[in-house]
Amino acid sequence: MSAATETGFTVWLTGLSGAGKSTIGRAVARELERRGAHVELLDGDVVRTHLSKGLGYSREDRDTNIERIGWVASRLTRHGAAVVVAAISPYDATRKRVRAWVEEHGPFVEVWVKADVEECARRDVKGLYAKAFAGEITHFTGVDDPYEPPDDAEVVADTVAQTPPQSVGQVIAELERRGLIGAA
Ligand code: ADP
């Protein structure tokens, strides 16, 4: 468990908008708290209203956003927190950069929250795909902006085939397997 004197770690959820990052991130954070960890959930949508307010969706701004989140995650990891990040983080090189920052202080567990664009558009949780396909929003990941799938994710959560509890269970099982959290 990540009490102040124990190992911090970061769980980094990456995937398309609507793939299930926030859903899984919130549930994983709740479960970690239940087990006594000091948890910080950094959700991309929330971060963009504070830490990254004013940044847009160009490659440069996306990288700045992810680097800010990665920097905070690495600092928190250093102090023994269980950090859960839910952010599209579309660029592989940028994810690898923040992984290296976190790994200076503790484990980095990358979770590819995997759902295809068609399924995410069908869910259209935030109504953004309809706008992106209509051309009302541009630079939308998976529509007219790239998403580079990870080749080094510790967990691949296929949210088309799985229910949310199954995906959450997969993440928790990986953390248990690595000895980062105790059994329930
Ligand atoms: P994101 O944070 O990636 O933009 P959200 O978590 O906001 O995505 O939305 C994901 C949607 O997909 C929710 O409506 C959720 O109930 C649904 N969903 C279906 N299966 C899963 C799964 N296995 N894991 C997470 N979400 C899922």
Image: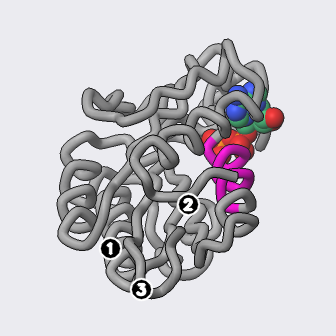
Q: Secondary structure at mark 2?
A: helix
Position of 120 compared to 170: left or right?
A: right
The numbered mark at residue 59 is none
User: Could you tell me how far apart the alpha carbons at marks 2 and 1 are, in whole angstroms?
Assistant: 16 Å
The answer to if 22 sits in the magenta stretch is: yes
Task: Check the image and name the residue furthest to the front.
Answer: 183
Query: Is the residue indicated by label 2 positioned so its CB lies within 8 Å of ligand 1?
Result: yes
The numbered mark at residue 74 is 1
Q: Which residues are magenta?
A: 21-29
Picture coordinates of residue 131 (x, y %)? 70, 35
Q: Nearer the viewer, residue 4 or 120?
A: 4
Please tell me which residue is depicted at 32% across the width and 80% down the height of the picture: 78
Residue that numbered label 3 is attached to = 5
Q: Mark 3 or mark 1, which is nearer the start of the sequence? A: 3
Could you tell me the amino acid type at mark 1?
A: Ser
Residue 63's place in the image compared with 140, above or below, is below
Give the number of marks: 3
